[in-house]
Image (spheres, helix red, strand yellow):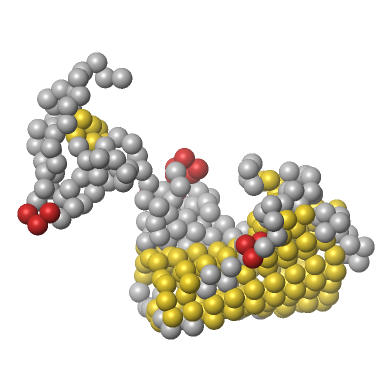
C-alpha cells in the first residue's frame, strides 16, 4: 500500500466526447489517475481519448487486462471472404508469456451459414486461428495458416477449432503451426479434405467430454480425406477427458499420408484437462464407435498410441495401412481386432 494519500484527476474529454482506451487496462473500472505524489501517476481504468498526462514524470500502468478478441468475427448468411491478402496476428508478442496470459482467438465464425472463406493468408497467430461455432453449410478453402515462427513456443496455435456446426467443409488449405491442425470439439457432417498440415499435433478429435452427452460433446459423421500430415507429433488422434461423457461416431479416415510423424494412430481415453496431459487412467465415458481408417500411408515412429476405455470403445476397423514405422506401439484397451 502506498504511504501517500490518493487523489484523482478529472477525466479529460476531447471535443466531441470521443473515447479511447489506454492499453492495457481493465474495461470495468471508473476512469481516473491515482497520484501518490505530483510526479508518479498510476493508470487504471478506461481513459478518454486525449487524457492529459503532462503532469506525470513517471507513469505506472496498473491492472493488466488482456484483450479477449477475436480480431475478426463473422455472423450471417451468404458471406464471401476472399484473398489474396495477409493478416498478421503479431503472435510474437504473446508467445513468450505462455500460460501466464490468455491470448485472443484471431478469427471467429459464429452462426455463419451458406458462406465461403478462401484464398488469403493468416500468419503469426497468438492463439487459435479459426474458431468455428454454430455454423452450417460453410466452406473454408485455399487458405494459408502460418504460425511457424519461433518454433516451439507458439503453443495452442490451432488451425481450425470446431464446435456445434453442421455441414462445414475445410479443404485444400495449408497449415503450418504448433498445435492441432484440426481440433473437433463437436459437430456433424464435417469434411476435412486435401489439406496439408505441417508441424502440428495432427488431425484431432477432442479433447472432448462433459458431465452430459449432448450437442456440445458429439462428433458424428466426420470425413478426413486425402490429407498430408508431416513433421507432426500425431497423425490421426481422438482424445477424450477422464470421467466425462460424449460421443465420437461414424468417423472415416480415407487415404491420408503421414511424413515424419511420431504416432500414426492415437486414441486416448485418459486426458486430464485440468493438468493438461494424459493421466494414464482411461476412465473417460465418451463413446468411441464406428471408426474407420481405410488407407493410411507414409512414415511414423510408432503405428499406435492407444490407451482406451474398452467399455466405451468399439467397432474400430483399420484397413489398407501401409505406414513405414520403427515400432508398432501400444494398444491398451483397443478392441481385439486391433493387433499390436
Q: Quadrant of the C terminus?
A: bottom right
Task: Decide which of 5, 231 is in the foreground and name it.
Answer: 5
Q: Is residue 300 above or below residue 307?
A: below
Task: Decide which of 163, 254 is in the foreground and name it.
Answer: 163
Q: Is residue 290 above or below residue 261?
A: below
Q: Is residue 256 above or below residue 261?
A: below
Task: Decide which of 148, 12 is in the foreground and name it.
Answer: 12
Q: Name the image quarter holding residue 266.
A: bottom right
Q: Is residue 296 visible?
A: no
Residue 244 placement (x, y as % from top left): 72, 51
Q: Name the image quarter holding residue 15.
A: bottom left
Residue 88 placement (x, y as % from top left): 37, 63
Residue at image location 19% in from the left, 20% down from the top: 5
Residue 114 placement (x, y as % from top left): 49, 83
Residue at image location 40% in from the left, 67% down from the top: 73
Q: Is residue 66 visible?
A: yes
Furthest residue toward left: 15
Is 9 on the left or on the right of 138, as rendered?
left
Furthest residue toward top: 3
Q: Name the image quarter holding residue 6.
A: top left
Q: Quadrant of the N terminus?
A: top left
Q: How many marks?
A: 0
Residue at image location 59% in from the left, 60% down from the top: 180
Q: Is residue 337 above or below residue 77?
A: above
Is 34 on the left or on the right of 38, as rendered?
right
Residue at image location 12% in from the left, 54% down from the top: 17
Residue 293 placement (x, y as % from top left): 77, 73
Amino acid at each position: 500500500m502506498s504511504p501517500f494519500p490518493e487523489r484523482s484527476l478529472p477525466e479529460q474529454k476531447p471535443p466531441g466526447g470521443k473515447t479511447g482506451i489506454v492499453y492495457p487496462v481493465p474495461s470495468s473500472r471508473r476512469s481516473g489517475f491515482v497520484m501518490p505524489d505530483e510526479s508518479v501517476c498510476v493508470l487504471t481504468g478506461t481513459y478518454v481519448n486525449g487524457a492529459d498526462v503532462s503532469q506525470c514524470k513517471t507513469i505506472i500502468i496498473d491492472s493488466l487486462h488482456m484483450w479477449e478478441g477475436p480480431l475478426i468475427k463473422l455472423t450471417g448468411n451468404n458471406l464471401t471472404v476472399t484473398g489474396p491478402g495477409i493478416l498478421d496476428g503479431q503472435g510474437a508478442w504473446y508467445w513468450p508469456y505462455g500460460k501466464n496470459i490468455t491470448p485472443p482467438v484471431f478469427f471467429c465464425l459464429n452462426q455463419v451459414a451458406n458462406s465461403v472463406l478462401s484464398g488469403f493468408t493468416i500468419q503469426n497467430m497468438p492463439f487459435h486461428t479459426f474458431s468455428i461455432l454454430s455454423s452450417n453449410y460453410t466452406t473454408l478453402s485455399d487458405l494459408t495458416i502460418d504460425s511457424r515462427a519461433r518454433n516451439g513456443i507458439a503453443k495452442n496455435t490451432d488451425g481450425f477449432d470446431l464446435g456445434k456446426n453442421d455441414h462445414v467443409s475445410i479443404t485444400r488449405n495449408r497449415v503450418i503451426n504448433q498445435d492441432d491442425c484440426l481440433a473437433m470439439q463437436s459437430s456433424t457432417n464435417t469434411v476435412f479434405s486435401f489439406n496439408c498440415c505441417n508441424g502440428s499435433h495432427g488431425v484431432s478429435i477432442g479433447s472432448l467430454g462433459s458431465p452430459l452427452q449432448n450437442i456440445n460433446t458429439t462428433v458424428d459423421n466426420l470425413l478426413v480425406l486425402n490429407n498430408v500430415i508431416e513433421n507432426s507429433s500425431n497423425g490421426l488422434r481422438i482424445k477424450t477427458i477422464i470421467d466425462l461423457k460424449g460421443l465420437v461416431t461414424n468417423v472415416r479416415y480415407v487415404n491420408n499420408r503421414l511424413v515424419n510423424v511420431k504416432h500414426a494412430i492415437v486414441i486416448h481415453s485418459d486426458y486430464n484437462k485440468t493438468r493438461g496431459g494424459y493421466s494414464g487412467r482411461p476412465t473417460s465415458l465418451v463413446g468411441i464407435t464406428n471408426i474407420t481408417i481405410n488407407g493410411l500411408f507414409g512414415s511414423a515412429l510408432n503405428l499406435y498410441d492407444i490407451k482406451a476405455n474398452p467399455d466405451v470403445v468399439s467397432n474400430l476397423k483399420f484397413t489398407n495401412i501401409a505406414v513405414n514405422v520403427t515400432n508398432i506401439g501400444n494398444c491398451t484397451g483397443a478392441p481385439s481386432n486391433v493387433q499390436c
